[in-house]
Image: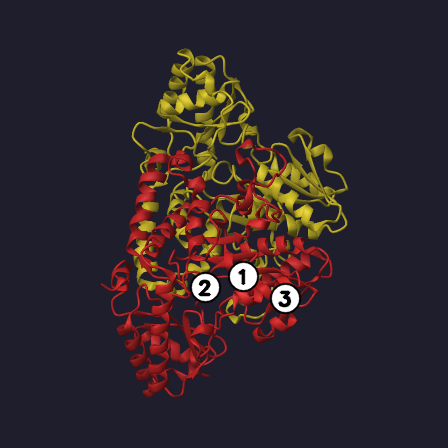
Chain colours: A yellow, B red
């Protein structure tokens, strides 16, 4: 039997909705609902404070972090959950800069998600030592990997176009010039095969609520390569990253390895949802997911291009250079997406003109893809969008 | 009818357990279980990505933050939820230091919770500009409020002894020397009446999982006084603190007022639990809660001192100087607490010798207090604790 028929049944998909926005927020796994309910009743309700030991809450950030680690090729014991992706970017960047103290430039690209750039800007402003954030077009990154760069900070898969950087290659080029690398895997983890260990990435960060389906506000994660895990001193030196949190020392002493990247009390309810969602990932392997995602993406591109000639492909045509989303451009993209959603097909819009569609084989099949393309055609042919809505700002993440 | 009989019925309290550890983790409100279940099913499950607008997820950090604001005397629109307390301490401290750029000293006390000191240490190390963290005994804080101090950073209620600083007085003394003040309300919010506005506190931070009963890992909150809310530039400049997050600008521009203290995607499942827990606070007022807490605390002190003469009161005897907890000291405190918990009375232990008991009128009454004291007597009289457990490290938060 097709494993993806099995996994699809594990999600709640609303009646009448074709959901191609799992690259923004994954749908609810039935098991997450049950797991959270049970966690609240049996653990928080019954164990109360003793849940930190009896239910293993205290160890969850590293134990569950390791389960994400498997999906991104991390060495065991080198991923920890916590906070939001923005906070994890900040931690990685502050640590990376300290590993290259004599250099002044953080290199990123204009395809990075803005919060990564904002966190860098805030850090630079605060450090006040002539650091520079150099933002170049994605295609110019490699040519800019010179000896003046301290840190290369990139999001592997572009949130708008789905264009994917070659992580192993850029990391290798960066390392030749002794540049520390940070990879944001927000649109990679659970979307495409990733191997941070093989690629020799120095730091990686990501979120769990997109392709990993942990629910709104699920915890972020951070990976630090084994060679640096015991070397870096965290900028956000919170008590749960302390070597002995329950000694209540007045002075910070960094914990062992990745544990030091913990900050404060972990969000246990959100982690319960994440853990149930990760069980689904144990049933598949990433190569299998990737292969199906490419098949569905190619089908979607073909169907949309045939049915809706006004839409222009905004993603790389070569599947190998594309993450697990397909984007099309149209000047009235916002209004078209609103109309499409009103007709039961949910994608999203990114300014100025991008219609985004997440391709997520765990719960999407061929029929969904065809239905989405046909509905898009109906909207386009009938010009069913509200032309006055053009330039209204999207309010989805 | 006694309102506290009503509120008590709103919590799940495990059979056979007398819970005096709500100062560490509050118990489960029945409504939180239902609210989270409904939120997951009806919002995440059915609305999917549109929940950010339709269910108002995006506005929750400020809307629900305001509900906590009411409990701490904040002006409306000046509290926002997010992250952990450690992260919020870091934000407040980085901003406070910028308001006093020519001074070099952060004043805190040895009764502060360690993570506040750790976050300060990490920030100082990173800023690398001769800043000093000066940690004095709690009783020496006032005498140290001199012109060299940039920021006074204190936790109002000591996590071990329950000793409470006079917020209004110390803030006034600090302001006379142009010192910026940060108050950590971890053991104050929902525990004692707080009025940050009247006290003229500059920054306040706190957590929601203790007296506010939001569950393990519930979100933290931050208050910035109106006079600074539009002035400070956040150190952690994440996209949800941007003036227009969905414009996806490449450059950070701080949002209006307290909104700029937001960082990344809020933990919506945890916030659902918090919001249900806060409904209970709408039924009472803090003066009423405080009055009952003092009554129960005095009763507990009297009963324990009468029944267990070996235990030495480690909290201020004057109720006005005490938060909503009572602590006793004993060299074998850890082992005694383990035995007490085994007998169904849950408090906790803090090194080196403190037995802590949270006094939480929303779900504790006179009978519970008497039962706790009697059980403690049984443990002490029978020497029922394991003497070999002495010095074993507590693993509760």
In terms of image quadrants, where is residue B308? bottom left
Cα–Cα gap, marks 1 and 2: 10 Å
Residue wearing tag 2:
B188
Per the image, label 1 sits on a secondary structure element best described as: strand
Residue B256's disc is none
In the image, residue A154 lies at what x, y percent?
A: 62, 38
Q: Disc 1 vs disc 3: Cβ atoms closer than 8 Å?
A: no
Q: Earlier in the sequence, mark 3 or mark 2?
A: 3
The chain to which mark 1 is attached is B
Q: Disc 1 vs disc 2: Cβ atoms closer than 8 Å?
A: yes
Residue wearing tag 1:
B183
A72 over A362 or under it: above or below: below
A55 over A180 or under it: above or below: below
Residue found 38% across the figure and 21% down from its top: A370
Residue B212 visible in the current orientation: yes
Horizontal relation, residue B62 to residue A99: left or right: left
Q: Residues within 10 Å of mark 3 (few under 14, many from 20)?
A: many
């Amino acid at each position: 039997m097709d494993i993806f028929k099995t996994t699809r049944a594990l999600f709640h998909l609303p009646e009448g909705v074709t959901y191609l926005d799992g690259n923004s927020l994954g749908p609810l796994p039935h098991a997450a609902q049950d797991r959270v309910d049970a966690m609240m009743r049996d653990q928080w309700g019954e164990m109360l404070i003793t849940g930190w030991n009896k239910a293993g809450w205290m160890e969850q950030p590293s134990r569950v972090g390791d389960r994400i680690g498997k999906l991104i090729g991390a060495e065991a014991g080198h991923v920890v959950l916590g906070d939001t992706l923005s906070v994890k970017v900040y931690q990685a960047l502050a640590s990376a800069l300290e590993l290259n103290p004599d250099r002044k430039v953080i290199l990123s690209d204009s395809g990075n998600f803005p919060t990564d750039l904002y966190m860098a800007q805030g850090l630079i402003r605060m450090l006040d030592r002539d650091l520079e954030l150099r933002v170049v077009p994605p295609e110019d990154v490699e040519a800019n990997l010179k000896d003046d760069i301290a840190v290369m900070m990139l999001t592997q898969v572009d949130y708008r176009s789905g264009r994917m950087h070659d992580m192993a290659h850029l990391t290798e080029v960066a390392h030749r010039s002794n540049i520390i690398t940070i990879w944001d895997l927000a649109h990679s983890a659970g979307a495409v095969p990733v191997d941070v260990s093989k690629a020799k990435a120095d730091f990686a960060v990501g979120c769990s609520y997109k392709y990993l389906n942990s629910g709104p506000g699920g915890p972020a994660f951070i990976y630090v390569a084994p060679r640096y895990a015991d070397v870096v001193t965290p900028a956000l030196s919170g008590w749960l990253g302390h070597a002995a949190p329950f000694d209540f020392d007045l002075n910070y002493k960094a914990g062992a390895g990745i544990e030091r990247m913990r900050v404060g009390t972990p969000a246990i309810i959100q982690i319960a949802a994440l853990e149930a969602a990760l069980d689904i990932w144990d049933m598949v392997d990433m190569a299998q997911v990737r292969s199906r995602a490419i098949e569905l993406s190619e089908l979607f591109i073909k169907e949309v291009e045939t049915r809706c000639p006004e839409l222009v492909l905004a993603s790389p045509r070569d599947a190998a250079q594309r993450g697990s989303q397909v984007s099309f451009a149209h000047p009235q993209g916002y209004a078209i997406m609103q109309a499409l959603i009103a007709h039961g097909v949910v994608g999203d819009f990114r300014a100025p003109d991008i219609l985004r569609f997440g391709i997520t084989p765990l719960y999407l099949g061929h029929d969904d893809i065809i239905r989405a393309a046909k509905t898009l055609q109906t909207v386009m042919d009938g010009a069913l969008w509200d032309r006055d809505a053009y330039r209204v700002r999207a309010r989805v993440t």
